[in-house]
Amino acid sequence: MKFGKWLGGGLGWAFAGPIGALAGFVIGAIIDGNDSNDRVRNAPGRTYAGDFKISLLVLIACVVKADGVRKAEEIGIVRKILISNFGESEADEAIRILNGLLQQDIDETQVAWQISRNMNYSSKLELLHQLFEVAYADGEVCDAEMNLLQRIAGIFGISAMDFNAIRAPYTRYSDAGWAYTALGIEKSATDEEVKKAYRKMAMKYHPDKLTGLGEDVRKAGAEKFRAVQEAYEHIKKERGMK
């Protein structure tokens, strides 16, 4: 087992609280032991790669369970997300942990509060972005999923503008103004305001802000950055901007 490779060298605050209890139970059940010798507690006070990854797994489990239905499209997207965050060699292990989490009763409110207290804003934005990927796996999001995402975002302290900006690219075929929402502006914005909004969003979602969470997570975060660029290019083409 390689659980120690990304948990052992990369868990700080997630060792405690509801996330630690869930992870410990599930991983212990998988390896039929506590694996304590393969895991090392990091000093508290910062978010390590393992903190982000186990938090992502727990929250993905919450989204998948939200509507009570397991869809093939959803499972495919989840696997893609896990590969992008954990790498090919460890994605299968992450899936095994996720399957174990899906069998547990998870209090998403307590989990979200633990994450919110310990993770910075950029990391929480990326978590929310990846949860939207799961929720929109089949092209639409049900009320139960959207309510869950809104509750989590509220506990995370994510602003309404940022919540709508993350969601906007998934509505591009149903909302003609999606690109403006993705940049956090109105359609009435001037060209200069569009450029300013793009620079602000590009800085906010630049993958380098996730560097401390490991190279896999940083690369996964580049997808949201590309969505911001696509929104800007869409507006430029629509307006004939240079």
Image: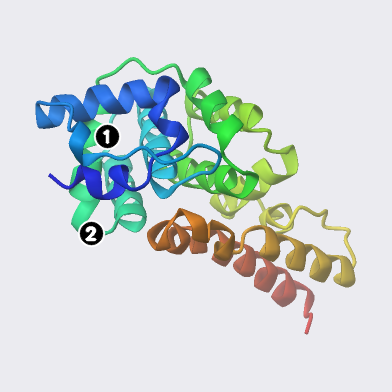
Q: Nearer the viewer, residue 141 or 134?
A: 134
Judge by depth and name the residue closer to the eye, 131 or 157. 157
Residue 229 placement (x, y as % from top left):
62, 69
Tell me the tag on residue 88.
2
Element under disc 2: helix
Residue 214 on image: x %, y %: 42, 58
Q: Is 220 located above or below residue 47 in the figure? A: below
Residue 4 coordinates in the image, percent (x, y): 23, 44
Say whether residue 1 is left or right of residue 80. Answer: left
Give me the disc on residue 174.
none
How far across and how far down the image is residue 112, in percent? Answer: 53, 27
- Does residue 25 appear left or right of residue 185 in this picture? left
Q: Can residue 23 be seen?
A: yes
Q: Residue at x 67, y 54 (%)?
A: 178
Amino acid, disc 2:
Glu
Residue beneath disc 1: 98
Does the rendering let one see residue 137?
Answer: no
Q: Is residue 130 left or right of residue 100?
A: right
Q: Quadrant of the C terminus?
A: bottom right
Describe the element under mark 1 as helix, strand or loop: helix
| Quarter residue 40 falls in | top left
The residue sitting at the bottom extreme is 242
Identify the amino acid type marked 1. Answer: Leu
The first of marks 2 and 1 along the sequence is 2
